[in-house]
Amino acid sequence: MNNFMRSMIAAAVMITFGFVGQAMAKDLVVVSWGGAYTASQQNAYHAPYMKQNSGIKIINDDSAGTAVAKLRAMNKAGNVTWDLIDVVAADGMRLCDEGLVEVINHDKDLAAAPDGTSASKDFGGLIVSECFIPQIVYSTTFGYRTDKVSRPMTSICDVFDTKSFPGKRSLQKSPLGNMEWALICDGVAPDKIFDVLGTSKGAERALAKLDTIKSDVVWWTAGAQTPQLLADGEVVVGSTYNGRLFKMIAVDKQPVAMLWDWQIFDLDGWVVPKGTKNKAEVMKYLRFATDTQRLADQSKWISYGPARASSAPLVGKHATLGIDMAPHMPTDPNNAKTTLLTNYAFWADNKDDLDAKFNAWLLK
Amino acid sequence: MSKSDSYVSFQSVQKSYDGETLVVKDLNLDAHRGEFLTMLGPSGSGKTTCLMMLAGFETVTHGEIILDGTSINNVPPHKRNIGMVFQNYALFPHMTVNENLAFPLQVRKIPKSDIEDRVKKVLDLVQLGAFGNRRPMQLSGGQQQRVAVARALVFEPKLVLMDEPLGALDKQLREQMQYEIKHIHENLEVTVVYVTHDQSEALTMSNRIAVFDDGVIQQLAAPDVLYEKPENAFVAQFIGENNTLYGKVIGLDGDICTVELEGGEKLKAHAVNIQGVGFETMISLRPERVTVNPESGQCSSTVTGKVKELIYLGDHIRSRMNVCGHDDFIVKIPNSADHAQLQPGDTVQVGWKAEDARALDVPVS
Amino acid sequence: MEKVQEKISLVTADGTPLKISLARAQRRSKTIAFMMVFPLLFFVTIAFIVPIADMLLFSIDNSIVKKILPKTTEALKDWSEYSGELPDEVVFAAMVEEIKSAKASRQHTKIGGRLNYESSGFSSLFRKAGRKVKKIKTPPFKEALIESDKRWGDIYTWQVIKQNSSEYTEGYYLSALDFKRKFESGKIESLPEKDSIYLKLFFRTLLISSLIVFLTLLIGFPLSYMLSIVSTRTSNILIIFVLLPFWTSLLVRTTSWIALLQQEGVINDFLIFLGIINEDGRLAMIHNATGTVIAMTHILLPFMILPLFSVMKTIPKSYVRAAISLGAHPWKAFWKIYFPNTSPGIGAGSILVFILAIGYYITPALVGGVSGTFISNRIAYHISNSLNWGLGSAIGVILLGIVLLFFVFYDRIVGINNMKLG
């Protein structure tokens, strides 16, 4: 392809996807999720780093929700304008598979723990891809209206029990999570879930279980929907990211309580796009932003668990509310009695197929 | 004329849009059966409002409109059976000429075969027999005009209203259409109420003309009467060309009065509309009634005029003179074999008969 | 004939042929005219033509496998895929060699991702192969590869690879129309009713969009009529109110409908206050097709009103008056005379609303629940979530085709020249 065509397509892609203008040489464009999450990163990472390095200006771009598609489009057009992207682990793996992000040497590129433990040991099993630097552990779990139930909800299967807990439920419009929970409540042993789900009979079984509550479900597509639906009293129980529920309970003092049973852990972290014009600067920033203290600092602002083992003891009180953050962390032993870790390998293989089945089921 | 002759009658009709001012003030007007009556006046004089009240598109604020002996104040417009030709024809653009003409017959539930006959007949009447399948947009302005007339006639109403129907045509076509409409009226014996602001159109076509100004009929008369014998300053000035001389009445003898002009000249005039001796008056004098260098005894008043400008117009020569201190005194000199030969700057005598100089009210300016 | 023409062709005073002289004289003004339209031409090209061409290409492009595994696909040509036997050693050798070199440039996972759209499991198959092939150094490669993952010994695996080794594929269109290729036999089968997604969504999108067109017309027509008969001053102010929604973001307008329509929302509360419904009878007006219809009718209403208004403004009052004076009841005058003359506005408004409606995805996603989502929501999903751009593009192309079909349909019935947009 000649240069003219390349720049034409670049322009077309930029118009189609509405990119922001190209960053200045010393600007680092960091793509993240916006809202409270970006604010926690701003407070814990960006602000202190910019204070130490006056030549760097970090610009937040809130388009992480569509980052995978946009990065792919930028890459096709040969004009990558981002320097660092915050993605969920599955997307990090996929971008790695497509060769759109840089491979990271975790021990060489990242700081060791204060006691000298290497970064790869400190992150441990959370390094799910060679391109991905874990940042936080979050979970998809349930919150329920304490004033609309006759007794506290304690089991994930209470979500499927419309007799004891009448009212609407909000679930994510995606097979992820819902199918696992359906199988657990249909009597499948937790360690056999993915063996069952991998067969077409197992998928049908999960959908059949979901069928029992289908008419009581409000399906959400954005994380903010469940908190809103709970606040409005539209649903009695709903799934979302635990940080959103923390805000409802601790900050907004809503009559909502957590249902941690079989919460599904997932990871969120950084990837460095191939083609960034500031790679050296980005790597320098990454070393700072993912060290033990910084990850612990982030948990002062939002109730997501730091990905480094060495950060856990440093988790303290909320920066403005002054409440102890540890009991609100999904990883707290009291909350993590029964958990699932997102099975990335399984979903990489089966998501397209199960998503099609799930959507066909929705349309019935 | 007796009352039974009246077909359309406005009785003490008043109209107000805002409840504060009257656009039609205590109007009384009768149109006779088969008459061509024109409402003539400047824009805003109330003539179109009267027509719209008659058609039923405006309500009557006070008074009554009688059509053929019965009050139509409460008859909805579609039941009045009045044909109407609109200013811009209002032909339905999505229908062919035939469909336009058939429309009033269809809504009257007339059998199909009859409709065809009557559409054909009326198209022949307006000489458009070959254009039935065209759309209005494919016709010239004059042709559209004829279709509009035909459509107002096809359901054989006894009364046809026309609202400045020739306004959009060029001069030549307008004159031709005036004759055609006049002839159609004569042949069909319908009553026509016609609204225009064009006096020559009114004079050409009408049996009688009602001159409107300021919501009031200033004069209602046949065209010749209106022209020859205007009863007030507005009519005199609105209809035809007119020389005006202002002065004071100093004597009155029967219907001849003596008027002293501002420059001191004393003239005899026909006392038509004066308040009496000592009051101001406006003398109206038609340019063609002025004689240049009259023989002695021919005219009752004679003054001196100075020729300022001459315009050759073929059938007559138009001469602008200074008479009694007025620079815009017009005299029409017929282009006859023995007419006076004038040059600008000549001083001549101009004279007229007392009965041609009409002493009228002074218009409020 | 032409030669004769040339002989008698006219020349100017200095002997130049008239045509050349004329062309020269016009060149300057033609150049200027071209320069003036050039920015638009450029914009249309990069913002419209290139993306559509790109989309068309994406929907059939299948070059990945062939590009990354050229030798393997070449070798697979000699293999008869329905023979019931595995390909021979040559194919396995080529595969091992090419996965090795693809692994170096991280290309092997791309193939896995691509083939996973066709059949689940390819993603892990190729990722695993990338890790294992470096240990396979000597023949026989067949046994070694099968040992690393027994799926390589499955004929089906090779059938999928072979049938996806051509430069272009109709596979995305098959998926977009609820068909599936059975790789075991190479036959194309339609999905059972219970598994079909896209045809249902296409049909629903068209149905709900038509309903929205009808409702915007029902509400917009009297409103536009009122706008067209009031004074210009008043209508200018009212038009601002019509356009006011454009000044707030689509998201805000959509979410305010949620606050109004939800079961604990304002309208339900009001109905309970009036005693029309009771606590248990709260109406479900959102998170279903009703929500989509209400919110989108509101959002798209201006696109119906503006063309209608601009057409109605040009219809003289005298048409209806003429019809009434000719004896038609006012209702008949309206229906037979006024209404037909608004058809250019109705046509333009309907086409505009319809085309906008079938492409909407944010509003249906937020208020549509399950029964009120559109085909565009699936396009959005495939573009930004599943990254199956081929399938997303194929659905997009079909949608584009439907729009064009409606244009042709409209042209046949009303005539495109009769459309008036404003």
Image (tube, coloured by chain):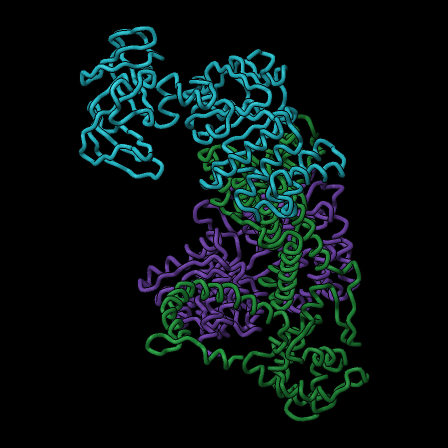
Q: Nearer the viewer, residue A119 or B88?
A: B88
Q: Residue at x 60, y 76 (%)?
A: C109
Count up the numbered dots. 0
Q: How far from the left and from the top, in percent, is residue B12?
A: 51, 12
In the rendered image of the structure, the colour used to display chain A is purple
Q: For the N terminus of chain C, which image quadrant?
A: bottom right
Q: Nearer the viewer, residue B253 or A239?
A: B253
Q: Residue at x 37, y 58 (%)?
A: A48
Q: How far from the left and from the top, in percent, is residue C113?
A: 63, 72
Q: How far from the left and from the top, in percent, is residue A93?
A: 57, 69
Residue B332 shown left or right of residue B181 in the figure: left
Instruction: Identify by letter the chain in green.
Output: C
Residue B49 shown left or right of residue A191 in the figure: left
Instruction: Identify by letter the chain in cyan.
Output: B
Residue B39 shown left or right of residue B72 in the figure: left
Name above or below for residue A206 compared with residue C50. Answer: above
Residue A339 seen in the figure:
no
Q: How far from the left and from the top, in percent, is residue C339?
A: 62, 40
Q: Residue furthest bottom?
A: C139
Q: Residue furthest right?
A: C84
